[in-house]
Image (cartoon, rainbow, N blue to C red):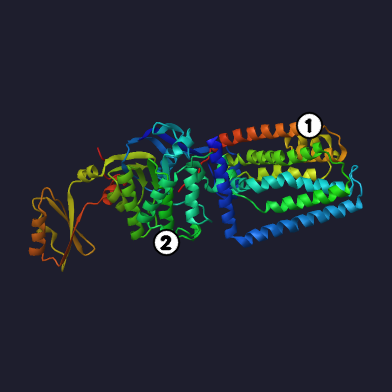
Amino acid sequence: MSELKYYIKLYFTNMSRSMIARMEFRNDFIIGIFGFFIQNVAALLSLYFIIRNIPNLNGWNMYQMGFLYGFTMMPIAVDHLLTDELWRLAYFRVKRGDLDNYFLRPVPVLFQVLSETFQPEAFGELIVGAVMLIMCGIKCHINWTVSKVIVILVATFFGAFIVTAIKILTASPAFIIKRSGFIMQVFYNFRDYTRYPIGIYPKAIRILLIALVPFGLIISLPVENVMFENYNGLVLCIAIIAAAVVSMTIACFVWTACAKRYESTGS
Amino acid sequence: MIEINNLTKEFRKPVREQGVKGMFKTLFSKKYESKFAVNNVNFTINDGEIVGYIGSNGAGKSTTIKMMCGILSPTSGSVKIEGVEPYNNRMKVAGKIGVVFGQKTQLWWDIPLIESFKVLKQIYRVSDDDYKERMDFLSKTLGLDEFLTQPVRTLSLGQRMRADLAASWLHNPKILFLDEPTIGLDVWVKEKIRKAIKVMNEKYNTTVILTTHDMQDIENLCSRIIMIEKGEIIYDGAIEDIKHHFGNIRTIVLTLKEKPDEKKLNTFNNKASYEWKDEKLYIKFDADELEVKNVVNYAFGELNAQDMQISEINIEDVVKSIMAGNEVIE
């Protein structure tokens, strides 16, 4: 228990440390948020122009599509908020050999990496996502039930776990091949598929998205459940939680095995 | 206590050929070349020792240190810190050691120094009382107060190094690894750092392993040196022994009006040797066999010297000659 308290306290200390560092560069921070808004407004506009001409995609109307788009941001925003350091690690930190400090301290390396940066820009994603969910949700006349809300919450938070697990799994090879950012990027980009109804894809891709790189499981299926009530909410929740536990366990295992191969650099 | 047994680290790299064509060849070739950065190294370091670990660039010093603190795993052999292997039981050992890599920093770049210390205090579970006592000691010996509130990236090299030493010692580790802690520093800062290391060792019985290219560090701090060259230990013993082995050699350098006739010089029955270099006369002799007074009298009397310098053998010369392989010990 005191061990758990130690880690929770340390986690929050690291968060505030990261915030202090961010505030040192206020302009950078503001530009970051601004850049994010422009990026998403542009993406939304292009989506709007496409959908305007196709009023109906596989049975989904414009507002339902908007709701789906909004929800693709939620689990990813939570992950982005907390674990952004994995990107830097995979792209250049292992290569530069500047992880030595993590290996010197009496705290698990993965814990230190995950608590290294707190990325407040992600609040922008959460807000944009939430606004879209609310606005489009109202236009869709969704019949909200407790079960649907629970599925959405489980999908957001345990979904974030799964996204993090995917990032850990794809960052781990960096310890062996020095740089694995591109691998991470490839898998991370699978989320783009889920911006459109999963029904439009061939079966192979659907299976891939649900079972292997489960962005479909944490985004497409919960949204379909909200719109069309074609799944059992409880089963969906259990599936997502199970996938989160399994993928995170595998990720930690792979990480530990790979981190042993860390080579540092000469000095 | 640190025990090192048959420690070996091999790095395997694909054989690279030059140029774009060579790059493509490398991509599909299975040829590897292996380099033994550390090769079959053995030594034991007891509690409370200050050991100088020296060798030329690329001799394997840093690799050994990295294996001792758990960053690298050895290819074969073992390191035991208090009976535990650091690369297999990283977390257990981490609390007992402190590390400074002169070339890198363990402090957080963008936050004020004092915040870094507070995070480290928490990581190493240092109690409030201990923290206060140690911070008092560290600020006093290392003079941290003047830059405690500045972000680390704004510190000068000397300030950063002092901060790094303080950070590595905040949890009062039993063993302190210092990898070139005085690199690039001015004399004043070097002196401060040496003094702090000395107090840590004397007052808190901290074991110190120090790599450096600065012989002044070695002579001031270490009682024992271990010398490594091309991954192998070439000397391990007390500094006094090494000096003793080379004898009590003195060199007297004379400034003369003109070059003397070498045949006429008094060699004191072949106990002194002469060399004329850079318009100066070098007289070399063993002070145990020949009294310094006699040579000095001779220099001013017969040779009519205008100026004179006497120097003892210093460890740097010894190291140089051992490294060059001129002198084999035992």
Q: Where does label 1 land, which residue?
A: A234
Q: Mark 1 belongs to which amino acid? A: Leu
Q: Secondary structure at mark 2?
A: helix
Rendering coords of residue B101 (x, y %): 43, 49
Tag shown at residue B146: 2
Kindly report the distance in space between the C-alpha atoms of the residues bearing marks 2 and 1.
61 Å
Q: Are marks 2 and 1 in contact (CB under 8 Å)?
A: no
> Is the residue marked by circle 1 packed among few (<14), some (14-19), or many (20+) residues within 10 Å?
few
Report the quarter where the N terminus of chain B lies: top left
Taking the spot 79% from the left edge, 43% from the top edge, the residue there is: A194
Q: Quadrant of residue A164?
A: top right
- Left or right of A80, for residue B94: left
Q: Is residue B105 visible?
A: no
Please name whichever residue, B40 or B221, is drawn nearer the observer in this view of the structure.
B221
- Left or right of B192, for residue B239: left
Rendering coords of residue B32 (x, y %): 52, 38
Q: Secondary structure at mark 1?
A: helix
Tag shown at residue B207: none
Q: How many marks?
A: 2
Please name whichever residue, B197 or B319, is drawn nearer the observer in this view of the structure.
B197
Task: Indicate whether B40 appears above or below A58.
Answer: above
Report the quarter where the C terminus of chain B lies: top left
Taking the spot 64% from the left edge, 58% from the top edge, the residue there is: A29
Task: Indicate whether B44 appears above or below A193.
Answer: above
Question: Outermost residue, front direction?
Answer: B129
> Is the residue marked by circle 2 packed among few (<14), some (14-19), or many (20+) residues within 10 Å?
few
Rendering coords of residue A260 (x, y %): 53, 36
- Left or right of B203, for residue B58: right
Please name whichever residue, B49 or B114, is drawn nearer the observer in this view of the structure.
B114
Asked if labels 2 and 1 share a chain, the reply is no
Rendering coords of residue A33 (x, y %): 69, 57
Please name whichever residue, B184 or A109, is drawn nearer the observer in this view of the structure.
A109
